[in-house]
Image (cartoon, rainbow, N blue to C red):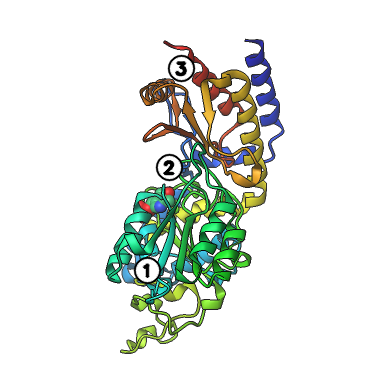
Amino acid sequence: MTEAVDEAMAARALDAADPLAGFRARFRLPEAADGTPALYLCSNSLGLMPVDAGARIAEVLDSWARQGGGGHEAGKAPWLTFHEQFAEPLAHLVGSASGEVVAMNTLTVNLHLLLVSFYAPTTTRHRILIERAAFPSDRYAVASQLAFHGRRPEESLIEIGPRPEEEVLRTEDVIAAIERAGPTLALVLLPGVQYLTGQLLDIEAISRCARAAGACVGWDLAHAIGNVPLALHDSGADFAVWCSYKYLCGGPGAVAGAFVHARHAHATRLPRFAGWWGHDAASRFDMPAEFVPMAGAEGWQLSNPPVLALAPLAAALTLFDAAGIERLREKSLALGRFARETIRRRLGGRVTLITPDAPAEHGAQLSLKVAGTPGRGRAVHAALQAAGVIGDWREPDVIRLAPAPLYNTYGEVERAIGHLARALAAP
Ligand SMILES: *Cc1c(COP(=O)(O)O)cnc(C)c1O
């Protein structure tokens, strides 16, 4: 009991000293049944709504109402170039030049578009390396691309996983698998942060190794962007894709993004599925018959930007830029340290944290397994939800809690763990 009191006091002191505390007021906080703010620890699934999101959408609607099609070229953010405002803030988040990124489509669509360009199997070099526990959509995309090229997974898919009795991948094992595949390897596709375990992979080392083996390398950053600082350009990765509704707070179904390394900026010989918005902007409206791609990531665009869907992302990225991903990461690590210490002290062996402890190997997410049967874990998760702690449950046996440094507090982490302790103590 006294421990809990000490931790609550420690949390209050940490919140009082938090230089990013002011950002919480820039978000709408969901309410629990009693009208108080819910303990929202679910930004790994859907980030909260920036207060300004509605105003950004209203600006677009207002422009449409007043000017009709004139909004394409007039107003504060003309629709023809609306997507361009996202390149700079996205580049800050992924560690690239602005020409290497573009906001477009949704994650799985972008993954397919980039697989068209970066998975061009030959008779000898045709294998794709993914993880056994890959997010289903990534697996479906890869399997269907293999089928599209007349390839069978039995020959062309390499799946890697943790060692028996271990929960997360070892970098040395990933590297060994890449080296074993050697000249048969066409592509490595891995997550920056693994969705189930919360493990942050060594993007730099794996990218370097894949390229040394002569393969292309792509990253799914769904759980990494806005969560951990990235250095995609320097990693040498060929491409990356992400969605914008998790840590990025772009809203449900938000417009996603893609990175294409600068060395492919003028790669006109790469196969690609083209659309008019990827065509050279200078001659796009001359309506030429021949496709001439724009330089850089914008050359992979298909359609004119979905302006209404993009508008809330502008509100969110303004806040990310103001806070800065390095400062956010600093707070995220401190929140995670506080959570880990509190969990160990109060919950002991009743839960296992499967997310790695080392700061270089995790983002914001804490993935917990409850001792006992999966049924027990599901019951504990349900008790947490009933107590107003919004986390999520992933089959077969993982509770995910993710404190987001833009708006979560140390006090919320402390209270959520208190609810977890009570749920675990219940029969
Ligand atoms: C969330 C997530 C997706 C989502 O795909 P959409 O195309 O945006 O629906 C894909 N891959 C991973 C790893 C994810 O975590």
> Is the CB of mark 2 within 8 Å of ligand 1?
yes
**Circle 3 Cα neighbour tier, 10 Å, few/some/many (<14 / 14–19 / ≥20):** some
Which residue sits at x=35%, y=63%?
Answer: 155
- Quarter containing the C terminus: top left
| Sequence-first tag of 1 and 3 | 1
Horizontal placement of 35 versus 263: left or right? Answer: left
Q: Secondary structure at mark 3?
A: helix
Q: Is residue 413 above or below residue 52?
A: above
| Sequence-first tag of 1 and 2 | 2
Report which residue position mark 2 lands on. Answer: 45
| Sequence-first tag of 3 and 2 | 2
Q: Amino acid at mark 3?
A: Ala
Horizontal placement of 229 versus 79: left or right? Answer: right
Q: Amino acid at mark 2?
A: Ser
Report which residue position mark 3 lands on. Answer: 423
State how far apart marks 1 and 2 are (Cα).
24 Å
Kindly check if marks 1 and 3 are in contact, taking CB atoms under 8 A apart as contact: no
